[in-house]
Amino acid sequence: MTSDVTAACPLPIGQYTHVLMAHGGGGRLMQQLIDQVFISAFSNPRLDERHDGAILDAQGRRFAFTTDSYVVRPLFFPGGDIGTLAVNGTVNDLAMCGARPRWLSAGFILEEGLPIETLERIVASMRQAAATAGVEIVTGDTKVVEKGKGDSLFVNTAGLGTIDHSMPIGPRHARIGDAILLNGDLGRHGMAIQSVRDGLEFEGPIESDCAPLADIVMGLIEAGIAVHCLRDLTRGGLAAGLNEIAATARIQIDIDESAVPVSEPVRGACEILGFDPLYVANEGRMIAFVPESDADRALAIMRALPVGDGACRIGSVLSDSPGLVTLKSRIGARRILDLLSGEQLPRIC
Amino acid sequence: MTSDVTAACPLPIGQYTHVLMAHGGGGRLMQQLIDQVFISAFSNPRLDERHDGAILDAQGRRFAFTTDSYVVRPLFFPGGDIGTLAVNGTVNDLAMCGARPRWLSAGFILEEGLPIETLERIVASMRQAAATAGVEIVTGDTKVVEKGKGDSLFVNTAGLGTIDHSMPIGPRHARIGDAILLNGDLGRHGMAIQSVRDGLEFEGPIESDCAPLADIVMGLIEAGIAVHCLRDLTRGGLAAGLNEIAATARIQIDIDESAVPVSEPVRGACEILGFDPLYVANEGRMIAFVPESDADRALAIMRALPVGDGACRIGSVLSDSPGLVTLKSRIGARRILDLLSGEQLPRIC
């Protein structure tokens, strides 16, 4: 390996004087921006954990707190819309902290001229997604910007969840020997969006996998599985999730390519459009790092739920390392599964 | 009075098919949008309180949770920038719930091409404002949109605060006989922004009043003042804050115009530009509804703090009403201080 293959070796942000689309793409440039602008300014123990959210100790209890803004285009796509995404995305970030999602905020930035009917459809989706995920939208804000200064509608949701256990769950807790479990096939969200953008129709529309993941997490925790690390596979896909964990935990992760499920329509779309499904964003897919001894039981728990019925074991943590992800191909060769520098698919979430 | 003078009588949102700038202006149209699109869809007891944030009961403790997106233009203005505003605005919404502000999230929507140096200046302001207000920025998110699809930078902050007392504080708790206290002169934030936009220089620049208000609130609560309602005077200014409280609590509020402080530079700018300072946004001004018997002690507590050194009593709650705010002029005549339908100053926060 060369010295620039992992997320542990960022290039200086200083070589870019202006924000590029790639700074929002979930790859190495986004990591650099986060490290060198945000974390260096706001540094504190919670932010430094590089988790999907912050774990807070408040009044003797533990909570998870997280935020995401949603800028996806188009607003409506097969399997969901920006509203379902804004609820499920934040619900999932809380779940990845081992928390039970409870309350969301919703902040809207509306562009002058947006049809109110469009806003009402999105709000109805948020209401439905919140009911499905068992969370309440309890506070909000609305801003309007002039025509041409926004893009119809952006939504931010922040979320708060309660943590009723004492397990430390997070990227730095992944351990040598851990089995890595995935809850289903990859790439459906990204390919659903891109197919709409490109006006492609495959044998049928590819539907986004957008779904809440908290039931899986609560199921694992309540069954006493020693969950070490959880990550939902959004921007940058499986490759980005694994690389971030490998770099934070300073481990080598090895993935068996043949074990990673990708549906035929998604594989076909990726081939036509030139994408690698391991890098494509998902909105209802997660990986769990659990001890080898808990792996079979954890898989059974995941498979018992609709959102985990395609769960499988895709790899394991091999050894200490500055942070490395390897992929064992179908013919047995190993290659490095690196972070991309930018993004394949802008504005996917 | 006619039947359309208060916030209690909204026009149907149905007459507008598209979002107008006025839907974000803090006036009656924004109230209608919130009522008829958001609250009707997400209805729950916390949202229905119409507070600056939600009060949550979690694990036997009380918390406040709030969010605001910031779209102010220009990004930098005398007395602050979008970063100071994004921290203080959310800190103040938590304080208005009677909470001690503790943790913030920060979500950035960046426009492709934004100078990274601009982002770094804003992040440095947020860091400084957070340190001053005693809060930590613990989690965040970054999205990038194409050039022309945003407006350099939008920030969302959500905030979480702890409530260590059992006082019910909120719009519906304002009571007949309450004294209404204001912490200082009005209109500086709005006029600071508008002066820059119009390229006006008065005798000196008008500086925004942007400041954290939590010390005032904690001071009142710790001194045992029976605080009934708190409101910071952002979009729509004093008039909007009073009207919202009057409509929610179903009371008549009477304000003594001569008691409301407005600095000479702000009064002059308002006259030149055609604004009424009672409707101009502030970012470090609040009103407190307290029992008559606590009013003098509360004023002394406010005046002992730099952000409250101009504190004064501006009026009182007179009687039950469907929701009415009256203004007693310098010559003793009373007029209705109504909500505006739209906004005087777009993108003020």
Image: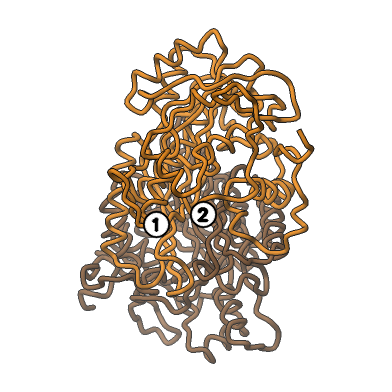
Chain colours: A orange, B brown
Q: Is residue B150 left or right of residue B116?
A: left
* Residue underneath mark 1: A198
Q: Is mark 1 on a helix, strand or loop?
A: helix
Q: Can residue B290 be seen in this view?
A: no
Q: Is mark 2 on a helix, strand or loop?
A: loop
Q: Is residue A123 visible?
A: yes
The answer to whether mark 1 and mark 2 are in CB contact below 8 A is no
Q: The residue marked by circle 1 belongs to what chain?
A: A
Residue A299, picture quadrant: top left
Image location of residue B179, percent across then percent down: 45, 61
User: Residue A299 — which label?
Assistant: none
User: Residue A346 — which label?
Assistant: 2
Vertical side of A155 occupied by B58: above or below: above
Q: Which residue is drawn at 36% across and 28% down?
A: A307
Q: The residue marked by circle 2 belongs to what chain?
A: A
Using a 10 Å C-alpha cutoff, classify the residue at mark 1 as few (fewer than 14 neighbours), some (14 to 19) or many (20 or more).
Answer: few
Image location of residue B251, percent across then percent down: 31, 62
Q: Is residue B161 left or right of residue B244?
A: right
Q: In this view, does B325 lie to the left or right of A161?
A: left
Q: Which residue lies furthest to the bottom in this view?
A: B272
Residue A46, picture quadrant: top right
Q: Which residue is drawn at 57% across and 48% down?
A: B141
Image location of residue B309, percent across then percent down: 65, 65
Of tags 1 and 2, which is closer to the observer? 1
Q: Label 1 is placed on what type of residue?
A: Asp
**Do the residues at pointers 1 and 2 share their chain?**
yes
Q: Which of A238 and B271 is in front in this view?
A: A238
Q: Which of B61 and B254 is in front in this view?
A: B61
Q: Label 2 is placed on what type of residue?
A: Pro
C-alpha span from label 1 to label 2? 13 Å
Image location of residue B222, percent across then percent down: 58, 44
Q: Which of B320 and A242 is in front in this view?
A: A242
